[in-house]
Amino acid sequence: MARMHSTGRGVSGSTKPKNPDLSMVDYEEEEIKDLITKLAEEDMMPSEIGEELRDRYGIPDVKAVTGKSINDILEEEDMALEVPEDLLKLMEKALNIKEHLEENGKDMEAKRSLSLTESKIRRLVKYYRGKKLPEDWSYSIDKAKLYVK
């Protein structure tokens, strides 16, 4: 998807290797699932769990080893997040901007940034509604405070 609020095309980042070398992975599928649940109990987000598995345990790609993504494994263990991680991070960003605006009310760039961030949130809510969010779920800054803090 292209950038929403800028002229960029959104081309970025590296790509995963097509055939990751799994011969160096010293863990079995059940051990990896146990590691994921242990890290989730420490209140880590799925992306943080993936980074931790890659950096500390040498597991380059969970899905290539287990056949399931980290989110799928967490859903099986009933440890999945109520709100998708990307939406949660955007709500956290909106709250930080809102706090900044309470102290600096004349910061017009921050006001625009809050408007753009809330626009992205509403767009994601529309996408996730009925899939990962209930049909009647809607965004408000008060609801974001409950989820983030």
Image: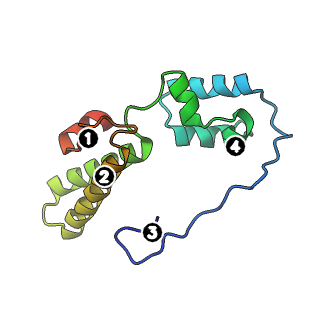
Using the numbered discs, state the Cα–Cα distance from disc 2 to disc 3 in whole angstroms: 16 Å
Horizontal side of residue 88 vs 107, given as left or right: right
Q: Few, some or many C-alpha atoms within 10 Å of disc 4 (few <14, some 14-19, many ≥20)?
A: many
* Quadrant of res 120: bottom left
Q: Is residue 33 visible?
A: yes
Horizontal side of residue 79 vs 123, given as left or right: right
Residue beneath disc 4: 61
From the top left corner, tell me how far across and down residue 89 is, in percent.
39, 47
Using the numbered discs, state the Cα–Cα distance from disc 4 to disc 3 in whole angstroms: 26 Å
* Quadrant of res 70: top right
Pick out the residue farthest to the right.
23
User: Which residue corresponds to the image point at 82% horizontal and 47% vertical from the top-left?
Assistant: 21
| Mark 4 or mark 3: whose residue is earlier in sequence | 3
Residue beneath disc 3: 2
Q: Is 1 or 34 nearer to us in this picture? A: 1
User: Which residue corresponds to the image point at 47% horizontal and 64% vertical from the top-left?
Assistant: 1
Label for residue 144? 1
Using the numbered discs, state the Cα–Cα distance from disc 2 to disc 4 in whole angstroms: 29 Å
Q: Secondary structure at mark 2?
A: helix
| Mark 2 or mark 4: whose residue is earlier in sequence | 4
Mark nearer the viewer, 4 or 3:
3
Using the numbered discs, state the Cα–Cα distance from disc 1 to disc 2 in whole angstroms: 10 Å
Q: Amino acid at mark 4?
A: Asp
From the top left corner, tell me how far across and down residue 84 is, in percent.
41, 40
- Up-down: is 34 above or below 126? above
User: Which residue corresponds to the image point at 71% horizontal and 23% vertical from the top-left?
Assistant: 31
Q: Is residue 149 visible?
A: no
Q: Amino acid at mark 1?
A: Ala
Q: Secondary structure at mark 1?
A: helix
Residue beneath disc 2: 121
